[in-house]
Each structure stands twice: as C-alpha cells, then as structure tokens.
Image (cartoon, rainbow, N blue to C red):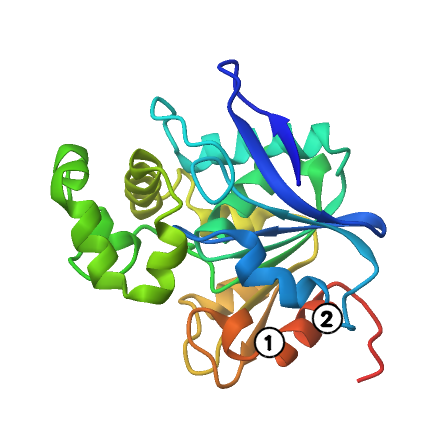
Amino acid sequence: MRDAQVLPDGSRIRWVELPGTDPARVFLHGLGATSAPYFLNTATHPALAGHRTLLMDMLGFGVSDRPADFGYTLEEHADVLAAALTQAAATGAEVIAHSMGGAVAIVLAARHPHLVAKLVLVDANLDPSTPARRPGSSGIATYTEPEFLAHGWDETLERVGPHWAATMRLAGREALHRSAVHLARATVPTMREQLRSLAIPRTYLHPAGAEPGGVAQLTQAGVRLVAIPDTGHNIMLDNPDRFAHEVADALGVTTGA
C-alpha cells in the first residue's frame, strides 16, 4: 500500500499500486465504495495488465483517512487527489472513474490538466440531481448532517443492501454525507459542461439502454459513448470481461480481441 499526505493535519490518501510501465492508470471509485474491490479484476485483466496502476481511495473512503473537518466538495476531492498524484509522480495519467469518482475525475482534469491525459468515465454523474429517499447519493442528501449522523447512517446501510454496505461501512460518516450533498448540487459550471470543454480523449461507458442525457451534445463535443450490455450501474462487476476490453479500446490498447 502507498500513501501521500494531502492535508496539513496529516490526513493521507492511500492506494494499492501495481507496478508496470508509464503512463500510470488511476482507478477511482464511486460514493461509499473503494477502488480495489471494484477494479482489481479490471486492472489485472490481460487486456490491461502491464501498466503502472493506482487503485486509489478518495479522502474519506476506503483505506484513506476520514477527516471530519474537511468539506468534501467535488473541487476539494479533486485538489487532494491532485496532491496525491503529484507526490506519486503520476502525471499525464489515464484515469478510469466510476459514478461520483467520474464527477471528481472531470473536475480533476479541468483544474489540474497536466495530471490527466485520458479519461474513461463509468456511468458517471454529470448533472445536479434532486434529493429523493432512495438508495444512492440522492437518498443520503435528503438528510441534514445532524440527521444523517443520528439515524440516517443506519437507515442508509439498510436501504442500500449488503453488497454496497460492505464498502460504505469504511467511509467516514461526514465524508459520505457531505460528498453526497455536493454531488447532488454538482459544480458550477456543471460536470457535463466541464467534460464537454476538455481537450483530452474522453469515453463515457454506460449500461445498454441507459444513455446519459444530452447524447448529441456530448458526441458533438468529442465524447465517445459506449453501451455495455448486461450491466447495471456497477458495469465493471456485472460484465467484467467486456468492461476491460472496452476500457482497453478507450485507452488505445491493442488487445487482439
């Protein structure tokens, strides 16, 4: 395990690193998740193996520290990730990012363009959303922070079910709530607008039959959209072989398949 101090209080981001050639590949998880359980099969798949790979946990989640006095805005997530990637000498990285991690990755590429050379988004959040009491970030965002700390945490773990709860239990409670609230609010300009303005290769992977809104505008801006069959939101877990090959294709890797 590797780590980098990203805040003056000593808080550290941690990651699992696989050795290989540069440029580095950086995998970022979604809300309440952690990168290694979601992406290790992809990182070691024959279509992608051989590159230096960082399975990185965002601040507040997984094996990274969980400071209670951090804001956890998307911009702050991006900036501390930038600090970690800089210390890891992972400039010009190929970033593969799921869900909320995709939103953060867009902001990272916009704010720290020297760090991101290619971007593969996996059913990522692009727009503001209206909080609603259901599993996911929108459900968490319906609580005030005191409500979430008092009873919303337990209610959320029950609502999301055992699979997601297994990694959500590793998150800081303040980190989970604040990240969900800021994800629902989105950024100004929005993640979608920032994505359209980026000048790097961008691919958006989504479940078949569940295209993101504004497809014409995204494709006109040069974003490549790819539908993955037989998947839900967790594409990398639902159809891992197809996912790995599509990531390889997005990164320009010749797989022979």
* Residue 177: quadrant of the picture: top left
- Look at 67% across and 72% down and name the residue there: 244
Residue 228, compared with residue 28, is above or below; it is below
Residues tagged 1 and 2 counted as in contact (Cβ below 8 A)? yes
Q: Residues within 10 Å of mark 1 (few under 14, many from 20)?
A: some
Q: Which mark is residue 45?
A: 2
Q: Amino acid under label 2?
A: His
Which numbered circle lies on residue 240?
A: 1
- Residue 69 in the image, given as x and y percentages of width and height: 35, 21
Whole-percent x, y for residue 169 in the image? 35, 49
Note whether residue 64 is visible. Answer: yes
Residue in view at x 45 percent, y 53 percent:
30
Expressed as whole percent of the image width and height from the top left, the position of residue 196 reads 55, 53
Which class describes the residues within 10 Å of circle 2: few (<14), some (14-19), or many (20+)? some
Residue 159, placed above or below residue 31 = below
Percent of width and height locating residue 19: 81, 50
Residue 175 image-quadrant placement:
top left
| Secondary element type, mark 2 | loop
Q: CA distance from mark 1 to mark 2?
A: 9 Å
Classify residue 65 as left or right of residue 164. right
The earlier-in-sequence mark between 1 and 2 is: 2
Instruction: Give the answer, above or below, for where 33 lies relative to 4.
Output: below
Residue sitting at x 43%, y 40%: 189
